[in-house]
Image (tube, rainbow, N blue to C red):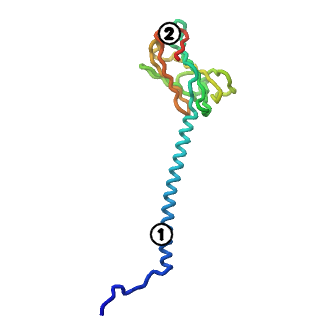
Amino acid sequence: MKKSFFSNERGFTALETAIIMMAFVVVAAVFAFTILSAGMSSTEKSKQAIAAGLAEVQGSLELRGGVIAETISGGTTITQVRFCLALGASGEPVDLTENSGGNENVLVIDYRDDTQRLGDLAWTKEWRGYNDGDDLLEARELAEIVVDLSDLSTGLGVNTEFVIEVKPPTGGVLVIERTTPPRLEQVMDLG
């Protein structure tokens, strides 16, 4: 008597097949949910990065007009620099509260040349044209900034390259690079 290799020829029933199919569907659904969640998280992070980049650009300042350097009558060093600021590309308002009365500047102005670097210089503002009465630089407003250079250890003299960095609390840094002329006068337009 020969034994059959397939002694139990019983097959799957419809109920067993349905259970196996449901298990595959559940595993596929969990896998799909995981992939979609990762994609949503990645998309959300991308949105946050784009929003942060736009906030950086929208708060940017731009230089309007020339940079004016002044000396004391007959002086050999520049004592102050003037320039006008406006908002760039319909940006967010920038606080121009001055550092009088012990308050810290919201806007920070730094100076550097080949021999020195000074941070958070003293400065004042004067509004030119339209201003709504607050200390915020807003659309359609123009503020003239006067930077005091009297605290430089080496005075700003002739033929000297220098950089002034205007740093708002948000947005890009406005970099103003100029070179002083070979002969100083009381008032000079550095371009």
Q: Quadrant of residue 52?
A: top right
Q: Which residue is mark 2?
A: 184
In the image as oriented, which residue stretches furthest toward the top? 74
Residue 22 spot, x, y in % from top left? 50, 71
Q: In the rendered structure, which disc, 2 or 1, sits on the residue that comes first in sequence?
A: 1
Residue appearing at x 58%, y 33% in the figure: 59
Q: Secondary structure at mark 2?
A: loop
Outermost residue on the left side: it is: 1
Comparing marks 2 and 1, which lies closer to the viewer? 1
Q: Verify CB contact (< 8 Å) between mark 2 and mark 1.
A: no
Q: Quadrant of residue 88?
A: top right
Residue 83 at x, y percent in the picture: 57, 20
Residue situated furthest bottom in the rendering:
1
Q: Nearer the viewer, residue 172 or 117?
A: 172
Q: 43 or 152: which is nearer to us?
A: 43
Callout 1 secondary element: helix
Q: Quadrant of residue 147?
A: top right
Up the image or down, 177 lies above or below 76; here it is below
Identity of the residue drawn at 48% across and 12% down: 181
Decide: few, some or many residues near mark 2? Use Cα within 10 Å; few <14, some 14-19, many ≥20: some
- Residue 120 vs 23, above or below: the answer is above
Residue designated by label 1: 24
Question: Who is closer to the viewer here, 80 or 122?
Answer: 80
Residue 143: x and y in percent read 62, 23
- Rounded to the nearest whole Å, what is the CA distance between mark 2 and mark 1? 84 Å
**Amino acid found under the numbered disc labelled 2:** Leu
The answer to whether 70 is drawn above or below residue 101 in the figure is above
* The N terminus - image quarter: bottom left
Q: Amino acid at mark 1?
A: Phe
Q: Residues within 10 Å of mark 1 (few under 14, many from 20)?
A: few
